Amino acid sequence: MLKHETKSKILTTDFDSKLCHKVTLILQRLEVSKAMIKNVVIPCTYCIFFLFLLLIFSSVSLAAESTADVSADAQLKEKLRKEILGVTSDLKLDAEYIVGYRDIIHVSIYGEGSMAATENVDRPPAGVAEGLSDNFIRGRGSGIEVRLDGRISLRHIGDVSVVGMTLTQIADYLKKLYSSIYDNPSLTVTLVQSNSRQYTVMGQVTAPGQFHLDYPITIVQAIARAGGFTEWANFEITVIRSQPSDPKTAKNQSDQRTFEFDYEVFLKGKKIETNIQLRSGDVVVVH
């Protein structure tokens, strides 16, 4: 009996030791400092209970709400935004992003994970410059690519058309579709990578090509991004806008279909307002 009891104690101690070691590893993965881990004494008899609590709280931290379930509406957000900024007049808001072809989005349901039928997004070949090739998807991790037919493939519901919709509209749409499968699903749609919004720079620049419109960019910035002027450039630029605003409601030059920009005049500090921001589909021709 003594040998049996001794062997049992050794096995129990070894089990507790391994369990405590696993708890320490989990704490490190949760970015708990080494000093805290060293100073906190966790009785081994409570290791299983502690692991259970860790699993609960780690899953809660990954929770995401569907846009249809968000309790703070647009009016409340706008009111609080004005209070924080200390203004009373209406604030300008950019239009919501509209999903296009080749965009990469992520669709997930809380408790179920990703709803992608497949998530296999290739990264661009090493050494390929953005303006030199448009045959790649700029991958930033996993996601669902919007195909050339405007659809994405999702688990349980198959192909769904999403081109031309905002992220909010897609989330509300998918929530209704998945409600036939899950009980009040909490769904999130995230833009992983914008690939559909592009502009073109051609003519007398060092590196002409197509460029992704990832952030607000002006004519001058676009030319700099394309390597600057060549030695044969005369610094006159034409911008062709493929999707102009309604001519009846156009209020400034940026709403027109085509317009001219003179870089030398701009350098003299004149007509600064003509250095407008580019839009998706714009073609910048440098003469």
Image (tube, helix red, strand yellow):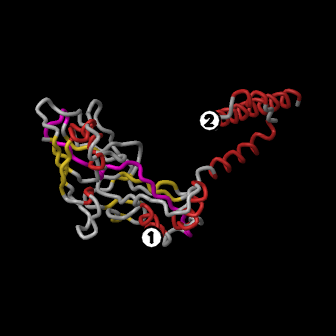
Identified at 39% across, 62% down, the residue is 166
Q: Does the magenta segment cover residue 232?
A: no
In the picture of the structure, the residue carrying the numbered disc 2 is 29
Q: Do the residues labelled 1 and 2 touch (CB within 8 Å)?
A: no
Q: Residues within 10 Å of mark 2 (few under 14, many from 20)?
A: few
Name the quarter where the C terminus is drawn: top left
The magenta region covers: 183-207
Q: Is 244 located above or below residue 272 in the figure?
A: below
Earlier in the chain: of badge 1 and badge 2, it is: 2
- Give residue 49's position: percent from left, percent from top: 76, 45
SS for tag 1? helix
Q: Is 165 located above or below residue 125 in the figure?
A: below
Identified at 26% across, 37% down, the residue is 267
- Give residue 175's position: percent from left, percent from top: 48, 67
Q: What residue type is labelled 2?
A: Arg
Identified at 59% across, 66% down, the residue is 71
- Give residue 213's position: percent from left, percent from top: 31, 47
Q: Does the magenta segment cover residue 194?
A: yes
In the picture of the structure, the residue carrying the numbered disc 1 is 177
